Amino acid sequence: MLVALVSGGLLAASFEPLTWWWVTPFCVAGLAVSVAGLTPRRAWWPALVFAVAFYFPHIVWMRAVSTGAWLALAGIEALFYAALGPVLVVLMRHRAWPLWGAGAWALAETVRSSWPFSGMPWGRLGFGVMDTPVAPALAYVGATGVGFGLALASFCLAAALLRLRAGTRTTATGARAPATGPRAVVAPLATVVVLVALTGLAAVFPVRLAVSGQATVAAVQPDVPGAGNDILAGFREVTASTVRETVALAAAVDAGQVPRPDLVLWPENSTAVDPFADAETNAGIRRASEAIGVPVVVGAIVDGGPGEVLNQGLVWEPGDRTAEDVTERYTKRHPVPYGEYIPARDLLEDLGVPIGNFGDLALIPRDMVAGERTTPLQVAGIAMADAICFDVGYDDVLHDQVLGGAELLAVQTSNATFIATDQVDQQFAITRARAVEAGRWLVVASTNGITGVIAPDGSVVAEVPRRSTATLLEEVDLVEGVTPGVRVGRYAGWGALALTAAGLALGLRAGRRRVPGTMEEHDPTSPAPPHPS
């Protein structure tokens, strides 16, 4: 229990804000060590301790929404890691269990990132490697592949430790230990060496895609009035500030102080009301787009059907006025359950459940509908992949658009609710990982932080401080082609499922007794080893 508690807590410290990335392999190895030798029924408990120690601190920022939301979400996600305990015990009956265990870890990350509802991708090992030697591997094997590799190295370390420990114990009792002790750790440690070497090769020979051209992009950060954490309280000022920044950029362009951008990116919730239904908002957007003379990608809340709302990126051309004019749109594909929509609302209402009596749920009168677009936006002749806020954590959003020919990546986000928490830094790290994985430049526009421009190697070229009003103007490369990491990402989950299934089949078939921690088979009919008198 103590090993599990420490390992889980340190794994949380490997992510922002501490970023103690070097502890990651030892933390994941600690989970395996904590369940070794237990029955599947008992292994649940140390795995649950590990899960709680990791995930509750990792997303403590959810308390900015409500304590209940934090406890519920962290509790659900912790169950996925807790389930790994019994699975690992079964897998450890086979000598090659680190391989099967890494598949199980990757499978758990994949499943919990998509279920229940839309899942929660925060806390994947592949998102915690920025500014480490492992980061370049994202372009080769994707976030899931990096998580698998880290888990494999971790479980190999655990296997070596368990075999050394088993060898010491059997020697003390006089029992035979044909695969324990120093010789037994050669294979797992050799695997770790190979993984380290492959990681080094990825850093020495990074993926480089063909550059098809250049573009100048602008990203606006308008800031949020007051404490900065309630965008709805001052949503008109947010829109007005965004318009002013764009008009000021246009004036600087006209004065010859800066080059004219090819496009301007506004953040999510740059307008919190439907710009086609609200005259004031519509006029402000038209004034800004006509002043700058290029397309403006507006982050807008747009009315949907009855009781529905859409979170969209609208490509607003100069001269556009109505919904029929704006034909290029991206709709957020992964709305947040209980934050942007209430799952099974109709069923709950039919059952007579008073949704309006459940605190913050009363603030969600309409359900946000998920989008289905998988192709990039066409903006000023540029194929641009768009993601809105939490969308960036889900593989399918940017992967699909890159496979559809996206030359540039963009993220429109509003982290105002979490502006005083570590969520902002965690999401920016995920965003940087996506740039490396796709091998493309990425532009982020946020309401009050963090707005920035990221290069294909994950380096931050430009950044606007939190709680400030500013506009970034940068020249970026347009890239064509697809990295191996994006291609692998489409099938990584299925590969993890196959490995886990194979490992469980082998583990369940192994019915003979084994020396604890060694994965060595023993004939239960053989005489018991002699004991010293």
Image: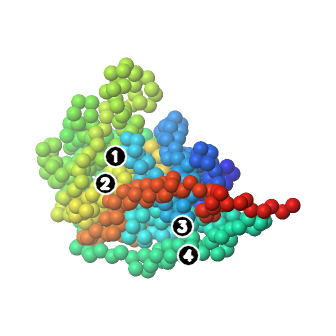
Q: Is residue 67 above or below residue 87?
A: above
Considering the numbered disc 1 on the image, is that residue within a helix, a strand or a loop?
Answer: loop
Where residue 63 appears, x then y in whole percent? 52, 41
**Sequence-earlier tag: 2 or 4:** 4
Q: Look at the image and name its color scheme.
A: rainbow
Q: Mark 3 points at which residue?
A: 153
Where residue 403 appears, x then y in whole percent? 25, 62
**Real-space CA distance between mark 4 and mark 1, rounded to the nearest whole angstrom:** 41 Å
Labelled disc at residue 334: 1
**Sequence-earlier tag: 3 or 1:** 3
**Disc number lying in front (2 or 4):** 4
**Sequence-earlier tag: 2 or 3:** 3
Where residue 305 appears, x then y in whole percent? 22, 33
Q: Mark 4 points at which residue?
A: 190
**Disc number lying in front (4 or 1):** 4
Where residue 409 appears, x then y in whole percent? 30, 61
Considering the numbered disc 3 on the image, is that residue within a helix, a strand or a loop?
Answer: helix
Considering the numbered disc 2 on the image, is that residue within a helix, a strand or a loop?
Answer: helix
Q: Nearer the viewer, residue 375 or 266?
A: 375
Figure quadrant of residue 160: bottom right
Q: Name the residue under label 2.
A: 397
**Disc number lying in front (4 or 3):** 4
Do the residues under discs 1 and 2 have CB atoms within 8 angstroms?
yes
Do the residues under discs 2 and 3 have CB atoms within 8 angstroms?
no
Q: Residue furthest right?
A: 533
Q: Residue furthest top?
A: 352
